Image (cartoon, rainbow, N blue to C red):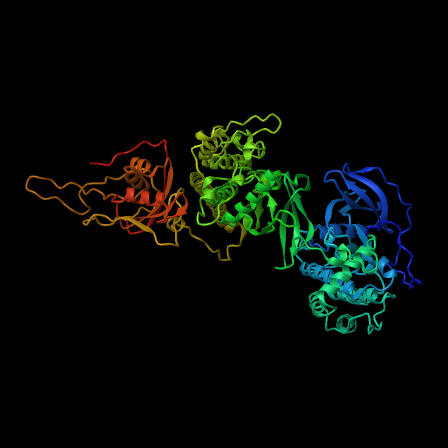
């Protein structure tokens, strides 16, 4: 969306070249007097300013977004338009909402009611239109080359998404005022863009019908002469090449113009001529690659020339002849970083996007806010944050790249992309299994931080980023506390200065009410690893209930009850209640304990979800069977007797085939080899046959004469043979229950979930609390040792059982 330049455009040095009048439509709409909207509040959000552009179908106004506090451009459609322009409006909004590129205008909002006003809100582009710059004469080759690289890169992404702009010309390209001081261009006005077939953006599930309809070819053609019969991506390639030729010559666009001039580098002229006169360059990727190979001049001289031109074109004060300026010197922060934009600002620091010219990558550069400059305690705190990031060895914490103190204190880290948990919570309650998985990821990050002596102290949804793959990233360690463990790690090297070791909480307020522990907010000290336990539990409570633990208005702490959660999530109430105790001494939880408890709850939640899925499959199968049976009954009435009817017989044996486990039992696990708990006695009875039907709850006798053995003697009568002990869930529960008290006492667990696979009397411990058995986990090895020596009935077929040992279950003693 084009915006008017700031201030009146200066008169060109010589006679302005004649421009061919653009032909937007063959059927122009009648003119409509512009409406003065300045000072009005549009949609209860946008305070309208002056009109800055527009055409026959819309007007563009500068406005202030009262919700975000930023300047925006509002494009308002006429309310008397036919359907085709309305469809183009919807298509433009749909395309801009899905194209994210720094050189493409960004959409902020749209309103599309059945009856007007229809409007589109984009970022306000503080710059100047290239058509105005061309009227002043030829642009330097270094400037045109930089614009060509940026625009071709943006359009290559646009084409990859299945979108063709179809109206590339100087009036739809903007030179933007940028923090770097270098040339920065943006592509605007996707009003007649086309969605190609097969594009994901054009899919019926993504695009509304009005956006999918093609623009009428007999009405809108684009701008002449930038369109010469080409369709598809080649149309944009031709239009961009003609635009570059026009900017280099300063003359009216002419595809046959002679570019062999002293001011135009031969390699650049050859690329443009090839794109205009042959079919060797027909894609935007090919044009961008050819432009990168074109030699304009040395990098330093080209950058200096670009900066001088940008400063002059955007109406900055020109420098005196022969005197270098900041724009000429190409300033770089710390000698290597060029600022590109803002990422955010907090109470102490400011984070900006910067380009690392040494390693050729974008980084997040954090500095101390100017209002906090000179405060020694904040400088120490700033350095502690960088050292904490360097010490934490976990992918969930941002990676530290560089740090320094000149020209001011700073450090650089990776740019973390994703959606904050705060934004996710605004959309609704998070599904329990996902919430537990996110919480476990967060606990693992903090566990890694605590292992090196770093306490975050400000864990909250705004500082939790959900990135690709639904992985958690924890940001903003500015309020972190370095424990004595941190300073004892590297005793062979110079120690941290004593004045930088003080506890931040004793000198200034940190943390966020509602998420930070009471001892963090009290300014009395006492913060430690259990402070982060409080914050994690507060965040998890909000994820599961969508209610904050602490009311932000009254600061009243909610009482956590088991009744708030479903049956499978009930144990999490005990964890949350323990983890959010007011006194740190009452929070008898470490991050490792919290992780184990959440793993147990997640395993239960996973089994509930799997049971629901199996129940749904069974329901669908039952309905299908009923439909087939009904069809078979009605077949004689629906079909003539002379036609053969195919019958399908469903037997009980076929219906239960493969159903070896009860509903609560997970399927046999594969992967790592199981751990053998015990073997049966030497003289084991013959393996019994498993009953085909479901288990009825009875427990066969475990002792007696083996099947088929008949006692003999002169004075005895042969008794009927007793059945051998059968491997059932009840028999497994009975035998494991004899070791329950030992497991609780020796392994220090209140509840635990065991997954066993039993075959031919041999029991394998495959999972503990949903995690694969590991020799490195002391809980796993302890449970294995306590179950050693148990005997189970023999069975030919393997069977899997999942058993839960809870605090409420009675303890059993080993039989003597």
Q: x%, y% of residue 278?
A: 76, 74
The answer to whether residue 593 of the structure is visible from this angle is: yes
Number of numbered markers: 0
Closer to us: 16 or 478: 478
Q: What is the quadrant of residue 152 in the picture?
A: bottom right
Residue sitting nearer the eye, 672 or 170 = 170
Looking at the image, which residue is at 69% across and 52% down? 340
Q: Residue at x 59, y 38 (%)?
A: 377
Q: Is residue 615 visible?
A: no
Q: Position of residue 741 (x, y in %)?
A: 30, 35
User: Vertically, is 482 above or below 193?
Assistant: above
State the quadrant of the C terminus.
Answer: top left
Decide if residue 709 is on the left or right side of residue 777. left
* Residue at the left extreme of this rendering: 714
In the image, 41: left or right of 545? right
221 is higher (above) or lower (below) than 76: below
Q: How far across and down, in percent of the image, does residue 39 sit?
A: 84, 37
Asked if residue 97 is positioned above or below residue 430 in the image, the reply reads below
Depth check: 789 or 744 in front? Answer: 744
Camera-side residue of 185 and 263: 263
């Amino acid at each position: 969306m084009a915006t008017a330049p700031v201030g009146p455009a200066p008169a060109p040095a010589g006679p302005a070249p004649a421009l061919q009048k653009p032909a937007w439509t063959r059927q122009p709409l009648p003119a409509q007097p512009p409406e003065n909207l300045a000072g009005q509040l549009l949609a209860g959000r946008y305070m309208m300013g002056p009109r800055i552009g527009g055409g026959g179908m819309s007007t563009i106004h500068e406005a202030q977004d009262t919700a975000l506090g930023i300047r925006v451009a509002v494009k308002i459609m006429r309310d008397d338009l036919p359907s085709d322009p309305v469809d183009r409006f919807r298509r433009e909004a749909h395309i801009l909402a899905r194209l994210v590129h720094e050189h493409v205008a960004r959409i902020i909002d749209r309103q599309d009611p059945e009856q007007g006003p229809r409007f589109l809100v984009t970022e306000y582009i503080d710059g100047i239109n290239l058509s105005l710059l061309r009227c002043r004469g030829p642009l330097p080759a270094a400037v045109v080359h930089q614009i060509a690289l940026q625009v071709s890169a943006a359009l290559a992404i646009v084409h990859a998404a299945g979108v063709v702009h179809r109206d590339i010309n100087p009036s739809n390209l903007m030179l933007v005022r940028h923090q770097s001081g270098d040339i920065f261009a943006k592509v605007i006005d996707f009003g007649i863009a086309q969605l190609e077939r097969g594009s994901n953006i054009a899919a019926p599930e993504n695009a509304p019908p009005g956006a999918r309809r093609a623009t009428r070819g007999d009405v809108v053609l684009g701008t002449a002469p930038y369109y010469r019969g080409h369709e598809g991506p080649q149309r944009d390639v031709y239009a961009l090449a003609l635009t570059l030729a026009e900017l280099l010559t300063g003359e009216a666009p002419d595809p046959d113009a002679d570019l062999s001039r002293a001011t135009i580098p031969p390699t650049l002229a050859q690329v443009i001529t090839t794109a205009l006169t042959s079919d060797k360059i027909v894609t935007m990727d090919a044009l961008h690659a050819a432009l990168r190979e074109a030699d304009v001049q040395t990098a330093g001289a080209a950058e200096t020339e670009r900066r001088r031109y940008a400063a002059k074109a955007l109406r900055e004060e020109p420098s005196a002849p022969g005197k270098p300026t900041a724009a000429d010197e190409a300033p770089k922060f710390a000698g290597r970083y060029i600022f590109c934009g803002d990422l955010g600002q907090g109470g102490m620091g400011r984070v900006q996007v910067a380009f690392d010219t040494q390693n050729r990558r974008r980084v997040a550069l954090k500095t101390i806010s100017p209002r906090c400059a000179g405060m020694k305690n904040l400088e120490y705190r700033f350095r502690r944050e960088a050292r904490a990031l360097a010490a934490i060895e976990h992918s969930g914490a941002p990676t530290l790249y560089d740090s320094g103190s000149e020209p001011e204190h700073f450090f650089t880290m990776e740019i973390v992309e994703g959606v904050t948990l705060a934004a996710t919570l605004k959309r609704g309650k998070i599904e329990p299994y996902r919430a537990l998985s996110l919480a476990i990821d967060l606990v693992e990050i903090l566990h890694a931080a605590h292992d090196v002596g770093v306490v975050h102290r400000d864990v909250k949804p705004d500082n939790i980023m959900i990135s690709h793959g639904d992985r958690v990233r924890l940001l903003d360690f500015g309020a972190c506390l370095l424990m004595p463990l941190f300073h004892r790690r590297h005793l062979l090297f110079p120690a941290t200065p004593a004045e930088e070791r003080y506890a931040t909480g004793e000198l200034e307020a940190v943390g966020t009410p509602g998420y930070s522990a009471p001892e963090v907010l009290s300014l009395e000290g006492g913060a430690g690893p259990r402070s982060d336990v409080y914050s994690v539990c507060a965040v998890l409570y909000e994820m599961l209930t969508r209610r904050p633990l602490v009311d932000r208005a009254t600061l009243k702490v909610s009482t956590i009850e088991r009744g708030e959660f479903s049956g499978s999530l009930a144990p999490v109430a005990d964890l949350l209640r323990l983890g959010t105790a007011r006194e740190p001494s009452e929070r008898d939880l470490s991050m490792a304990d919290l992780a184990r408890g959440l793993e147990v709850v997640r395993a239960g939640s996973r089994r509930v979800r799997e049971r629901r899925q199996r129940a749904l499959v069974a329901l669908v199968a039952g309905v299908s069977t009923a439909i087939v049976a009904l069809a078979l009954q009605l077949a004689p009435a629906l079909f003539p007797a002379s036609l053969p009817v195919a019958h399908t017989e469903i037997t009980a044996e076929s219906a239960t085939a493969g159903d070896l486990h009860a509903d609560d039992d997970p399927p046999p696990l594969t992967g790592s080899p199981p751990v053998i708990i015990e073997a049966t006695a030497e003289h084991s009875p013959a393996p019994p046959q498993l009953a085909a039907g479901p288990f009825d709850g009875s427990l066969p006798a475990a002792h007696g004469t083996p099947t088929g053995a008949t006692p003999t003697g002169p004075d005895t009568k042969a008794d009927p043979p007793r059945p051998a002990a059968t491997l059932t869930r009840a028999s497994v529960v009975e035998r494991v229950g004899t070791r329950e008290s030992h497991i609780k006492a020796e392994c220090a667990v209140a509840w635990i979930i065991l997954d066993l696979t039993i075959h031919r009397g041999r029991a394998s411990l495959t999972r503990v609390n949903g995690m694969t058995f590991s020799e490195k986990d002391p809980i796993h090895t302890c449970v294995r040792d306590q179950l050693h020596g148990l005997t189970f009935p023999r069975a030919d077929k393997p069977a899997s059982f999942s058993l839960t040992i809870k605090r409420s279950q009675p303890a059993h003693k080993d039989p003597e």
